[in-house]
């Protein structure tokens, strides 16, 4: 596995990736939204026999972040076997396109115990996850992915599969490892507050919570966390909502606090969902380092692919931590870290926010 980070002209980016990953048979990349179509088609022209999927967003390199250019990770034929594909019409009827996905899942899962579905979806993430689950659950295959980020104003979100750029789709890769295990991990910087609540009234699109426990949503939120009308916006970064599922909990990021005392979110909240509020980890730097050390220290790491939420990234930026974080992740990945910033994350059966999800490829352990 090898990572490549390139800035500059479109032609130089395409030439650089094609030269450095010329021996690879599978590539995952992130490029700036402005040139995403040109870069995607150019890579396909230069590397017509390479399977590839792509997304947009801010990118991490060895020591910092950047917004224009490309970040790519390439895999050799000796490392993975891959089948890529697309779910189209994800806003209306993605289930129509399940046969190709089902075939890919069956093929890879029969041959490789260590496997995964890695995807990028342009939206409707809950629908994408639940649709893909139909194919995944019978084999136990795990899903992980993200939503395109850093999109230009007025531009639709884009993904790409083998050079084809799409705006209402999920591009996926079904990956089987030939060299070792594939570990997946979900991290958020928040711990849940013990009090639990029930969502009792939501909007038709399920992304605005009007009532919690039969009361105005902001009344409950401010009362429990000690905020006032003038300070409540601090809660966006410090105290997101969280959906409780069994023994686990999944962050639901806050989009806005509204004049009618409702709370709009980046993830669906359904009526009768069990939720709690959360608090940010005070020593978040050591918390993250400890998590990654536990995940990687006893393994021979071949490479890591990580997806950080935009709100998490902005928190890093506001605290001058992005560079240190990029260096830490690159070190944990033994110099092979592909990291991007998304507008949402998918993990197994859930669409989540304000978190990091990652895939760790290991060798023979």
Image (cartoon, rainbow, N blue to C red):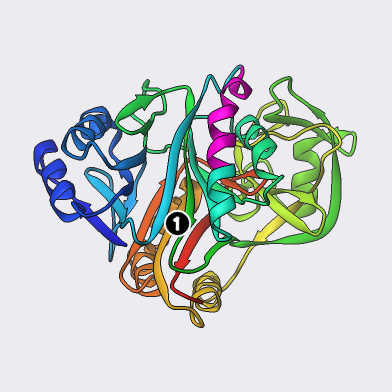
What stretch of residues is rendered in magenta? 93-105
Circle 1 residue: 306
- Residue at (74%, 52%) from the top-left corner? 277
Q: Main secondary structure of the magenta part?
A: helix
- The answer to whether 220 is drawn above or below residue 183 in the figure is above
Q: Is residue 295 left or right of residue 140?
A: left
Residue 203 percent across, percent down from the top left = 74, 23
Which residue of the protein is positioned furthest toward the right in this rendering? 214
Residue 78 in sight from this viewpoint: yes
Q: Return the x and y of residue 338 as percentages of the image width and height.
A: 35, 57
Give the secondary structure at mark 1.
strand
Q: Residue at x 48, y 26 (%)?
A: 169
**Quick check: 354 left or right of 223?**
left
> Where the N terminus falls, by quadrant?
bottom left
Q: Is residue 130 above or below residue 143?
A: above
Q: Is residue 285 above or below residue 207?
A: below
């Amino acid at each position: 596995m090898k990572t490549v980070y390139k800035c500059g002209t479109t032609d130089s980016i395409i030439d650089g990736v094609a030269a450095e990953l010329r021996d690879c048979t599978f590539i995952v990349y992130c490029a700036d939204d402005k040139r995403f179509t040109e870069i995607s088609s150019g890579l396909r022209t230069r590397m017509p026999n390479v399977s590839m999927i792509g997304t947009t967003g801010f990118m991490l390199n060895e020591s910092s972040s950047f917004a224009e250019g490309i970040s790519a990770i390439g895999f050799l034929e000796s490392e993975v076997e891959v089948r890529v594909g697309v779910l189209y019409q994800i806003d209306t009827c993605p289930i129509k396109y399940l046969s190709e996905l089902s075939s890919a899942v069956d093929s890879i899962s029969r041959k490789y115990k260590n496997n995964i579905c890695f995807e990028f979806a342009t939206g409707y993430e809950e629908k994408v996850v639940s649709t893909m689950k139909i194919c995944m659950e019978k084999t136990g295959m795990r899903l992980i992915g993200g939503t395109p980020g850093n999109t230009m104003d007025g531009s639709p979100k884009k993904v790409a599969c083998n050079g084809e750029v799409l705006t209402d789709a999920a591009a996926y890769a079904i990956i089987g490892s030939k060299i070792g295990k594939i570990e997946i991990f979900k991290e958020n910087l928040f711990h849940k507050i013990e009090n639990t609540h029930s969502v009792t009234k939501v909007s038709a699109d399920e992304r605005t919570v009007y009532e919690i426990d039969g009361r105005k949503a902001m009344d409950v939120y401010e009362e429990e966390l000690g905020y006032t009308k003038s300070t409540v916006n601090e809660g966006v970064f410090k105290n997101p909502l969280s959906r409780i599922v069994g023994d686990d909990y999944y962050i639901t990021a806050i989009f806005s606090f509204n004049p009618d005392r409702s709370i709009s979110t980046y993830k669906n909240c359904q009526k009768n969902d069990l939720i709690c509020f959360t608090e940010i980890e005070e020593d978040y730097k050591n918390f993250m380092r400890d998590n990654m050390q536990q995940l990687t220290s006893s393994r021979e790491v071949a490479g890591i692919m990580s997806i950080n939420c935009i709100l998490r990234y902005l928190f890093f930026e506001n605290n001058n931590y992005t560079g240190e974080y990029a260096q830490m992740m690159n070190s944990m990945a033994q110099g092979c870290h592909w990291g991007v910033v998304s507008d949402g994350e998918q993990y197994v059966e859930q669409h989540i926010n304000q978190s990091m999800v990652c895939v760790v490829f290991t060798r023979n352990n």
